[in-house]
Amino acid sequence: MLRPATEADSAAIRNLIHRVGINPTGLDWRRFVVAVDGSGRMRGCGQLKPHGKDIGELASIAVELEDRGKGIARLIIEHLIARARRPLYLTCRSSLGPFYEKWNFHTIGLNEMPPYFNRLVRLASLFMPKGESLLVMRLL
């Protein structure tokens, strides 16, 4: 089941983001939806991050390791896409690009990126594991 996050979910969101190793900046529980199991335990989360008035980012998509492959990320992503303004951007490791292509996200080049994402790509290049890069993708 998906529901809007509450302030009580804040620590669980931060802990999950930390465990799965994704960008921990900009975690505001008020922008999140959470997937919970029958007992109310959070199993996944995601948010729509605003970047000014005209740009949105699909961000912080995370699912507990033992719950991957059960469609939780798909539910979160589809829920957030349905509520997002366009264009909608996301960042991900290059190995995850094909996953997001299922929703018609397309990789864009540096010259097509808003300044925030351009800076992020340049900074991430210093820290990405060998064989990976940071992709910026856009949904029109």
Image: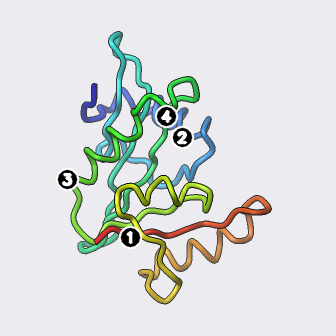
Q: Disc 1 vs disc 3: which is toward the camera?
A: 1
Q: CA distance from mark 3 to mark 2?
A: 22 Å
In the rendered image, the residue lying farthest to the bottom is 111
- Amino acid type, residue under disc 2 in the picture: Ile
Quarter residue 53 falls in: bottom left
Q: Disc 1 vs disc 2: which is toward the camera?
A: 1
Q: Nearer the viewer, residue 10 or 47?
A: 47
- Amino acid type, residue under disc 1 in the picture: Arg
Residue 27 placed where, x, y %? 44, 48
- Amino acid type, residue under disc 3 in the picture: Arg
Q: Earlier in the sequence, mark 3 or mark 4?
A: 4
Q: What residue is pinned by disc 1? A: 138
Q: What residue is pinned by disc 4? A: 63
133 to the left or right of 138: right
Residue at 42% in and 70% down: 106
Q: Earlier in the sequence, mark 1 or mark 2?
A: 2
In the rendered image, the residue lying farthest to the right is 130
140 to the left or right of 62: left
Residues at discs 4 and 1 in contact (Cβ within 8 Å): no
Q: CA distance from mark 1 to mark 3?
A: 15 Å
**Disc number for residue 17:** 2
Q: Earlier in the sequence, mark 4 or mark 1?
A: 4
Q: Disc 2 vs disc 4: which is toward the camera?
A: 4
